[in-house]
Image: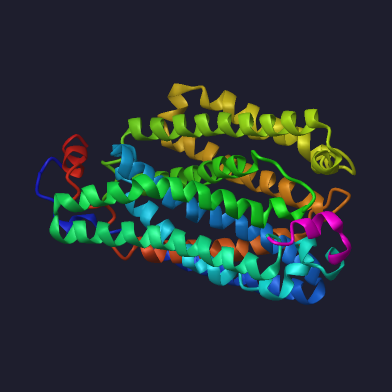
């Protein structure tokens, strides 16, 4: 693999992706079919479960866009070998705009401020200029227009790079990514206010947006580790994913796990020490009615367990072991997201079968389209000026 001339035909996606794509479609279809049945039996529960499942997967797709821009800015080879995965994930973002449409008829089941009785809530009315259905959907369109625009600008330039090898294209992608990553953080922060923080319209946290962005980065990163592990066991990438790349992924996971814990603790300390009833009610709901059984394990298993495991440099260099941590963290990301949303709707600890049906339904559709995009191009950017160095040392 030391030949400096890269032949695109040598870097086609693994044939096994087709089988995984078929499985994803079946899982998605079954999950959505069960979700539809759940809709007719309990509309309120359907929409609440669907929101958690939808947010879980959309942040992974959006996170791929964020990591793509980080890779362009840093030029790190850790991300270069994953660029096609990042681009494929970000190109699925428009699918989530379509999958959000059920909320057009079901907002009242999820967001308190969207219900008719909100007109009698003085505090909610003070925020009515922001929390109203019309402006909510306008913001939704803006978020997805920006995310999609950035994703396809980078993706189209990457395709042009494959066709021409023009070094100016590499510079252009870096130029887009500079302001793009700032815009991405701002848009993702605003989206977190709409989709999750406004579930309890009396509550507000100045740190919640950063907390959500860090969660987005972590969720998408562990998803990327799973993809990297799968690809590194198959040709043509078996020789490109070196141990040091997985070591980098592990270090990033450790750093983001620590940052998630820092943001979580900071938000709690600031909110609780302020002792303002409208703010502390968010934490009171998560420490009563059985939810405390969720809260304490979340701290232990989302922070302390992965933190201690990822301190091992040897583990981070072994893909077969690191991927187990990645799968574990994907599960913990759902637990954290559920903990953020569900206590707003349920006074007592409650987990419904629709929570898993909607998660599988949206996830299956995402993975199907993700693999479709991944199979549409060579598995690596064959004319990127830095790839020859990676292959030459493979």
Seen at 29% across and 48% down, the residue is 175
Residue 30: horizontal and vertical position, in percent?
62, 70
Residue 80: horizontal and vertical position, in percent?
30, 44
Seen at 32% across and 51% down, the residue is 176
In the picture, measured across the screen, residue 159 lies left or right of residue 31, that is left
In the picture, measured across the screen, residue 198 lies left or right of residue 262, that is right
Q: From the viewer's side, name the closer residue of 361 and 160.
A: 160
Seen at 46% across and 33% down, the residue is 252
In the picture, measured across the screen, residue 29 lies left or right of residue 13, that is right
What range is drawn magenta here?
Answer: 119-129
Q: From the viewer's side, name the closer residue of 135 and 171.
A: 135
- Residue 338 visible in this rendered orientation of the protein: yes
Q: In this view, does 255 lie above or below 148?
A: above
Q: In which quarter of the image is the N terminus?
A: top left
Residue 191: horizontal and vertical position, in percent?
59, 55
Q: In this view, does 233 lie above or below 132?
A: above
Instruction: Name the main secondary structure of what is drawn in magenta.
Output: helix
């Amino acid at each position: 693999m030391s030949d400096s001339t890269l032949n695109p035909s040598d870097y086609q996606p693994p044939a096994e992706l087709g089988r995984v794509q078929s499985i994803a479609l079946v899982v998605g279809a079954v999950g959505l079919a069960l979700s539809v049945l759940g809709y007719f039996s309990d509309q309120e529960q359907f929409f609440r479960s669907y929101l958690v499942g939808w947010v879980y997967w959309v942040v992974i797709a959006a996170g791929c866009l964020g990591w793509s821009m980080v890779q362009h800015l840093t030029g790190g080879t850790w991300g270069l070998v994953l660029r096609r995965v990042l681009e494929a994930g970000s190109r699925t973002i428009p699918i989530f705009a379509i999958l959000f449409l059920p909320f057009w008829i079901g907002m009242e089941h999820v967001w308190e401020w969207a219900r008719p009785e909100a007109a009698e809530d003085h505090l909610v009315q003070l925020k009515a200029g922001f929390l109203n259905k019309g402006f909510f959907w306008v913001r939704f369109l803006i978020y997805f227009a920006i995310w999609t625009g950035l994703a396809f600008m980078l993706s189209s330039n990457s395709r042009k790079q494959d066709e021409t090898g023009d070094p100016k294209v590499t510079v252009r992608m870096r130029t887009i990514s500079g302001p793009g990553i700032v815009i991405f953080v701002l848009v993702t922060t605003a989206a977190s206010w709409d989709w999750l923080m406004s579930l309890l319209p009396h509550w507000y946290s100045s740190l919640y947006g950063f907390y959500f962005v860090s969660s987005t980065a972590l969720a998408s990163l562990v998803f990327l580790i799973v993809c990297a592990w799968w690809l590194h066991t198959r040709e043509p990438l078996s020789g490109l994913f070196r141990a040091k790349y997985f070591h980098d992924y592990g270090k990033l996971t450790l750093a983001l796990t620590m940052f998630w814990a820092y943001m979580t603790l900071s938000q709690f300390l600031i909110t609780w020490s302020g002792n303002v009833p409208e703010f502390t009610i968010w934490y009171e709901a998560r420490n009563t009615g059985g939810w405390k059984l969720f809260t304490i394990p979340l701290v232990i298993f989302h922070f302390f367990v992965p933190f201690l495991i990822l301190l091992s440099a040897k583990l981070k260099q072994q893909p077969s072991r690191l991927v187990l941590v990645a799968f574990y963290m994907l599960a913990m990301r759902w637990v954290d997201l559920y903990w953020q949303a569900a206590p707003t709707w349920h006074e007592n600890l409650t987990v419904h079968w629709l929570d898993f049906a909607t998660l599988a339904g949206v996830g299956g559709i995402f993975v199907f389209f993700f693999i479709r995009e991944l199979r549409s191009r060579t598995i690596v950017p064959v004319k990127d000026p830095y790839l020859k160095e990676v292959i030459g040392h493979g």
